[in-house]
Image: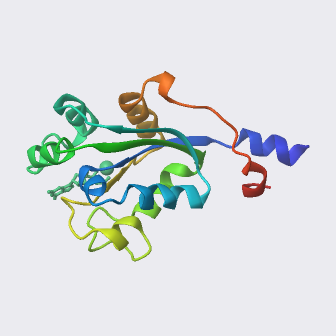
Amino acid sequence: FLPHLIASLEQVDQTYIMVKPDGVQRGLVGEIITRFEKKGFKLTGLKLFKCSKDLAEEHYKDLKGKSFFPKLIDYITSGPVVCMAWEGVGVVASARKLIGSTDPLQAEPGTIRGDLAVQTGRNIVHGSDSPDNGKREIGLWFNEAELVHWTPAQAAWLRE
Ligand code: GDP
Ligand code: MG
């Protein structure tokens, strides 16, 4: 009883993962979703989407002063993206590890960027950098009605 109670009190986080336009154009959507699915996180939102300049700028507002900001906005709005919300204990930090370093040439083999990309400006996937930003970004990209709260059948086989 006590371990179950403690487990249920563990912080469940949410992260916003997005396949960027180059990942979609290169046919890597399935491959990227598979990495998070196989790890054991729970998908709670998923859509193909063409985002506006305003939304891209709001999403990346912390980078507004950077020299590459206009190029970044052009890149993110250049074609469809795949928006995802994933949930789980430790999902934010773990997803960042699965994705790898911002510069794909520095990203470790075995990570998404390390295996599948070569350039920072074409690094195929986004992942939130903190639990607060996970919530913020999911709120930005999804309506509440687009998010699904469900219990995966495998839940008891992932966590004791
Ligand atoms: P992330 O959290 O690993 O995605 O990296 P950041 O939050 O630092 O940057 C957001 C995104 O901006 C990166 O994923 C890249 O797509 C882009 N970016 C960051 N630094 C550069 C840069 O020096 N040049 C270019 N062209 N794009 C950059
Ligand atoms: Mg970032």
Residue 115 position (above or below residue 75): below
Q: How is the image coloured?
A: rainbow
- Residue 158 % position (x, y): 72, 56
- Residue 153 % position (x, y): 74, 46
Left or right of 88: which side holds 81?
Answer: left
Q: Report the quarter where the N terminus lies.
A: top right
- Residue 119 % position (x, y): 20, 66
Left or right of 89: which side holds 116?
Answer: left
Q: Residue at x 70, y 39 (%)?
A: 151
Residue 147 position (above or below residue 131): above
Q: How many marks?
A: 0
Viewer-proximal residue among 85 and 62: 85
Q: Report the quarter where the C terminus lies.
A: bottom right
Q: Quadrant of residue 140?
A: top left
- Residue 63 % position (x, y): 20, 43
Residue furthest to the bottom: 109
Left or right of 26: which side holds 47?
Answer: right
Viewer-proximal residue among 56 and 94: 56
Q: Residue at x 36, y 32 (%)?
A: 141
Q: Residue at x 52, y 41 (%)?
A: 14
Viewer-proximal residue among 9 and 83: 83
Instruction: Assign ligand 1 to one image quadrant.
Output: bottom left
Left or right of 72: which side holds 133?
Answer: right
Q: Residue at x 59, y 51 (%)?
A: 41
Q: Quadrant of residue 53?
A: top left
